Amino acid sequence: MDDFVDYLSRQARTEGAALHEFEIRRNEGSNDLHAFVEGDEDSSVYAPFLRRIFPGVKCWSYVCGGKSAVQGARKHLLERKRDLRCVAFLVDRDFDDFFGVQASPEPNLYITDWYSIENHLVGREQAEIVLFELSNFRQTDLRCMSFLESIEETMRQASVAILPMIALALAAREAGLKPNFNNVDLSRLAEISSDLRSVKRKRAYLAACVAMLLPKGAKVSRRAATQWQRRLVSLDRKLWFRGKFELWFFHKLLQKFIQSAVQPKKAKGSTRSSRSASSSVPIVPSCISSARMFEGLGGRIEVIPSFERFLRDSIGA
């Protein structure tokens, strides 16, 4: 029964299902905004952006189940000469630039500045939102200030730790293989230090990367992987640091820091019961405890400037 439910859920997130839903909701004379996105979580970021840029305008999102499906939906509507005023197609940049297969800049088509939309959920400002707005830390908390001062360097180290794996994946793709990022367990590859200031690779790192990324028995040129690694280090890391991976490290850092601050307070067994006192006690927010960072940050981060320009210039809302 669970497999059947999963099947139905997957079918609801396809290009065909998204187009069908769009045809039902689209009213030719309406100024409603319609956004085709890759996955469920993307709407948690884009929908609040749309509402802030165009307050009072109704916004609809359609999950297509991937980048090619979003592009396919756009092609389908263009071929049928549908009016795409107030319709946006939103995709991640991914690694396509490296292989010359990136979607061409087109009206109504937005491509993220960095690898994916998840990369926009990671940074010092986003950490401040989690700590001060969602976790009840005081902005004068010295532990927070120290943690925030170090988070950029720690995330840089996380990117260094993961760089050989990304280079291996790109070399594999260049060789015609299909690396399986969905099979990657980052906890087997790297670990964050107890003081939250460094990230190091674990033992047997390369063997674990090969086992998780590549088909059984597949081989990739070490020279090709090294060349990719040299190329990547010269770029902004957010162009190649896969968004889901960067967000994983970011979540783990915040989770470890918040839990280290909350647990000692619980152990003290404070008997203060006033509402004002309890409201200042740090808590573990649901976006951290359930690892749903999209939900916690999606409606709170600043609108991405390139996205706002795209909306105002391209879709005619």
Image (cartoon, grey):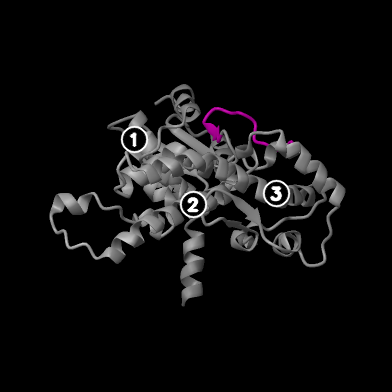
The residue lying furthest to the top in this view is 313
Which one is in front, 125 or 83? 125
Percent across and percent down for residue 147 are 45, 44
Task: Give the percent coordinates (x, y) of residue 1.
Answer: 46, 77
Q: Which residues are magenta?
A: 100-112
Residue 149 or 288: which is nearer the viewer?
Answer: 149
The residue pinned by badge 3 equals 166
Q: Position of residue 225 (x, y in %)?
A: 80, 48
Q: Point out which mark residue 253 bears.
A: 2
Q: Amino acid at mark 2?
A: Leu
Q: Which mark is residue 51?
A: 1
Residue projecting furthest to the bottom: 1
- Which residue is at a point 60% across and 48% down the rendered structure image? 158
Q: Earlier in the sequence, mark 1 or mark 2?
A: 1
User: Under tag 1, what secondary structure?
Assistant: helix
Asked if the residue under mark 3 is in contact with the one under mark 1, i.e. CB atoms within 8 Å, the reply is no
Which tag is nearer the camera, tag 1 or tag 3?
Answer: 3
Q: Residue placed at 31% from the left, 43% from the top?
A: 133
Question: In the image shown, does 116 or 206 lie closer to the viewer?
Answer: 206
Q: Is residue 61 visible?
A: no
Q: Is residue 147 left or right of residue 94?
A: left
Q: Nearer the viewer, residue 108 or 160?
A: 160
* Label 1 Cα crowd, 10 Å radius (few <14 / some 14-19 / many 20+): some
Q: Residue extending furthest left?
A: 274
